[in-house]
């Protein structure tokens, strides 16, 4: 089906949505899934998702079923399993060739996704890129040096709100008649989940005021505000509020979390709980619900915390809050900080120069933002 052809009518009986592979991106697909459910109330909607994200979706109001796959599972094996379910239509949210190949090999008759090289032949309906789409292109070092030597005007660096990644997924669902207007991502935390978290971690006493700290970021060091500044911010916020701290991170962040916990305890903060690598995805949602505010880098946990309703304070360096900020763009609950670095955003994993984008964000600014954002 050419890109300009209308999508099939009547609505599909069984629709497969091929979900994205990373936590932050998955949270940003929630508005699109909700709009899809509005547009197709009688359609069975299934989500194909990596196993590591499957806990995010049970009982989600937009979905009727979840199909999960292991990262090591071959595209052929995934396709065979999908073939048995006899879907009428597939909506492919990622831009990867593999995601389009999966639904092609599954013999799903109608297959919709963004037009991209190396995969267009697997799609029956190729959606052209949005005019507002802004690719997150990694800047070469030579370009970074030119920008530093001759900074562009502020207007030349402005990124429109419509470029936010939420709109990428909403625009795809519009091909099926869904409303493309954005909604805030929302993830519910049941009372029972909150009680189970308290039972597992009785140290997180409900009478205390808890703040959260997530100093890691899987993408690379360019997205991480210096850890010593996180420690200084946490110590000052405890001095001014008496808060306790929940320290978050994945298993790979456990050494970093231990370093932070040791520093906070050495500063005589009595209530510090290390949760890095010790929670499931649903337990992480419940833990974020306990926090009055989360200090975090631009990361999957940032998006997850915002979706459960916790305000976040996030320093941005190599990435752009206009593209991947938490919640709806310009949500007043969140405080997104950045320095005036002409080379940002560069979208690099590691800074090739002096890390001015993050070093320019002061501890005092983060502390004041957290005080303003805390519930």
Image (cartoon, helix red, strand yellow):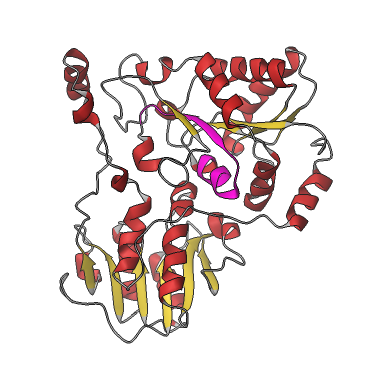
Residue 54 position, x and y percent, is 56, 60
Does the magenta-highlighted stretch encompass residue 28?
no
* The magenta segment: 302-318
Q: From this viewpoint, is residue 164 visible?
A: yes
The residue sitting at 61% across, 25% down in the picture is: 371
Question: Quadrant of the image for the N terminus?
Answer: bottom left
Name the side, left or right, on which 337 lies relative to 305.
left
The residue sitting at 54% across, 44% down in the picture is: 306
Q: Nearer the viewer, residue 219 or 177?
A: 177
- Location of residue 324 (image quadrant): top left
Residue 293 position, x and y percent, is 62, 34
Residue 60 position, x and y percent, is 57, 65
- Location of residue 5 (image quadrant): bottom left
Does the magenta-highlighted stretch encompass residue 314?
yes
Name the side, left or right, on which 206 lies relative to 330.
right
The residue sitting at 49% across, 49% down in the picture is: 23
């Amino acid at each position: 089906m050419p890109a300009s052809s209308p999508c099939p009518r009547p609505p599909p009986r069984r629709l497969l949505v091929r979900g994205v592979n990373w936590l932050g991106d998955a949270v940003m697909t929630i508005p699109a899934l909700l709009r899809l459910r509005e547009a197709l109330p009688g359609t069975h909607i299934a989500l194909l998702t990596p196993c590591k994200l499957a806990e995010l979706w049970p009982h989600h109001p937009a979905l009727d079923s979840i199909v999960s796959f292991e990262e090591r599972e071959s595209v052929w094996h995934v396709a065979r399993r999908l073939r048995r379910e006899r879907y009428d239509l597939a909506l492919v949210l990622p831009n990867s060739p593999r995601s389009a190949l999966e639904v092609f090999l599954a013999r799903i008759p109608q297959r919709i996704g963004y037009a991209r090289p190396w995969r267009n032949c697997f799609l029956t309906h190729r959606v052209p890129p949005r005019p507002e789409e802004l690719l997150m292109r990694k800047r070469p070092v030579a370009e970074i040096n030119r920008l530093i030597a001759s900074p562009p005007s502020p207007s030349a660096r402005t990124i429109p709100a419509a470029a936010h990644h939420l709109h990428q997924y909403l625009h795809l669902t519009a091909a099926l008649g869904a409303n493309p207007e954005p909604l805030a991502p929302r993830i519910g935390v049941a009372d029972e989940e909150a009680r189970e978290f308290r039972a597992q971690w009785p140290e997180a006493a409900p009478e205390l005021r808890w703040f959260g700290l997530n100093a890691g970021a899987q993408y690379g060091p360019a997205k991480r505000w210096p850890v010593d500044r996180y420690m200084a911010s946490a110590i000052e916020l405890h001095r001014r509020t008496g808060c306790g701290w929940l320290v978050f991170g994945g298993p790979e962040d456990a050494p970093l979390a231990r370093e932070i916990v040791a520093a906070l305890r050495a500063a005589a903060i009595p209530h510090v709980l290390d949760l890095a690598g010790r929670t499931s995805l649903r337990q992480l949602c419940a833990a974020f619900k306990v926090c009055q505010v989360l200090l975090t880098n631009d990361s999957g946990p940032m998006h997850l915390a915002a979706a459960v309703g916790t305000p976040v304070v996030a320093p941005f360096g190599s990435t752009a809050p206009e593209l991947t900020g938490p919640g709806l763009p310009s949500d007043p609950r969140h405080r997104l900080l950045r320095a005036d670095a002409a080379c940002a955003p560069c979208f690099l994993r590691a800074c090739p120069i002096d890390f001015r984008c993050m070093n320019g964000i002061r501890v005092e600014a983060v502390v004041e933002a957290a005080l303003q954002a805390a519930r």
